[in-house]
Amino acid sequence: MPWSGGKYNDDPFKVVHHTTEGSTAQSAFDKYNQDHKIPHFTVDATHIYQHLDTSVAARALKHPGNVQTNKSSAIQYELVGFAGRDKDRDALKNAGRLCRWIEETHDVPKQWPSGYPDPPKDGNDPGHHNRSVPNWNTKGGHYGHCHVPDNIHWDPAFTKDEVEFLMSVTESDFAVAALEDHEFAEAVMPNAGVLLDKALVETAEPVDSATQASEAFDKAMDKIKELVAAGDTKFGGFFPGGINYFEFSVAPTTGVKIVISSQPSPKPPGGVAESSVPGPRSTALELHTMLDEVAAAQVFAAAVPYPEWALKRDLQTAKANYWTSIGEACRESQLDLSVVLAIGSKESQWGLILRPVGPTGTGDWTPRDPAKWGHSMPTDGKGWGRGLMQIDWYSHDFAKTGEWYDADKNIKYGCNLLRQNIDRFVGQGIDPPTALRYAVSAYNGQHGPHSPYCEDVMKRADWFAKNP
């Protein structure tokens, strides 16, 4: 479901709670496919489904007036159920788990600026909802659909008890992670292609308890970390298209199974978490709860960061091919060398993951919504991202000219973009170190000083600064 609402504005991040007004997740999916008004997540009693990267806006809110709704840094989920009825306790628990992850990832405070949602009155709209525009525009936190300006819906109509239960779910309860596939690919497989057509890790040991399943899961993740740290490619080939299929299962007879593949796969048997999206690259990764005690979030917590062997390789590539251009661009734009090296590493691994490899290659082959972007892919048949610094074809005329092929010009253009963003944020009164972090996030269309993209780039920059 690749129908995003585009980039956020600069409002504080918030969580918006909806109800699907249906009894199954599938009925919600059918509706999304019809009207394309999708949230970031759908939550029921057993699953958390992710439909969009949380770095882009969803489309589940109306925007009839001048107040931004979807683009107001609103991360949205739909809870399977009805506004006028009691909410399923297990579904609320999953929603709480998801909210804790969103709060941690996007610095969302655990507060309800416009108050708790009003509970239903005899199963109907209680009326008199607080749709405060100043709260919405200036205060991060939790909002019901009933609190959103210029909207008329009254969901989720949580009772006070339901809100307090949802907000009481703690980090230790977090047993589900639904994160973007590119983050997983770069965390676990930073070479963007050391993938497998079949099983990456498969433990043959049967499990008959949550404890044994957790132990088997840890063993599997240790194996993944060993492969990544060693840069071992003997188990698979190079697939620049990215991850198209991932599955993780725990079952009494098969133990733990993890599959990462470059190719879409038919729906596996029951008890398996899957993400299978047609096209050159998946747009979402979902992990389902197999057993509460087996925290699927450990996939990401246990995964090693972008490994040192890859950083050394990226640095060697930059020095061997683009060092003079990088140095000149840094001086002209008054940028720290380590930050520019980190962005080039993050965006293209200094050309190593582009098609073709090198400065004339392109990346970002994910089809986009033609209604928003004009085309599903650029008209010249290449990827959206152009050259070493991955200048976006849609957003920049420079990327539509032949000049982006030139490594020197491409690097300078990317550096100028970063400098312009830094100056813009400094002009808003933000101190220079924090403005740099905002600018790094903005380079990738993300928001804030602690976006996933910014955190990754700054970690790489720290390594490059210590290893000149």
Image (cartoon, grey):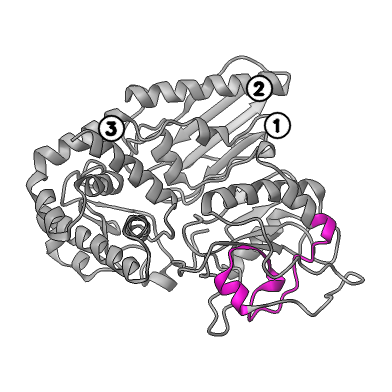
Q: Residues at badges 2 and 1 in contact (C-beta under 8 Å)?
A: yes
Disc 2 to disc 3: CB gap under 8 Å:
no
For mark 3, does the 10 Å Cα neighbourhood hold few (<14), some (14 to 19), or many (20 or more) residues? Answer: some
The type of residue carrying mark 1 is Leu
**Label whose residue precedes the other's in the sequence (2 or 1):** 2
> Which quarter of the image is occupied by the C terminus?
top left
Work out which residue is located at the far left of the displayed protein and give it: 324
Mark 2 and mark 1: span between their CA atoms? Answer: 8 Å
Q: Where does label 3 land, which residue?
A: 310
Q: Where is residue 467, by image quadrant?
A: top left
Identity of the residue drawn at 24% across and 38% down = 464
The residue under the point 74% across, 47% down is 168
The secondary structure type at the circle numbered 2 is helix
Task: Report the magenta residues as a range.
Answer: 133-162
Residue at mark 2: 213
Judged by depth in the image, the label closer to the viewer, 2 or 3, is 3
Q: Earlier in the sequence, mark 2 or mark 3?
A: 2
- Residue designated by label 1: 291
Eyeballing the image, is 105 above or below 10?
above
- Secondary structure of the residue carrying numbered label 1: loop
Query: Left or right: where does residue 246 sit relative to residue 114?
Result: left
What amino acid does circle 3 point to? Ala
Q: Position of residue 357 (x, y in %)?
A: 19, 43
Q: Is residue 188 left or right of residue 270?
A: left
Query: Which residue is found at the position 30% from the left and 29% from the top?
Result: 308
Identity of the residue furthest to the top in this view: 205
Which mark sits nearer the N-terminus, 3 or 1? 1
From the viewer's perspective, is residue 373 above or below residue 22? below
In this rendering, would 311 be left or right of 360? right
Left or right of 327? Residue 118 is: right
The stretch drawn in magenta includes residue 156: yes
Q: Quadrant of residue 196?
A: top left
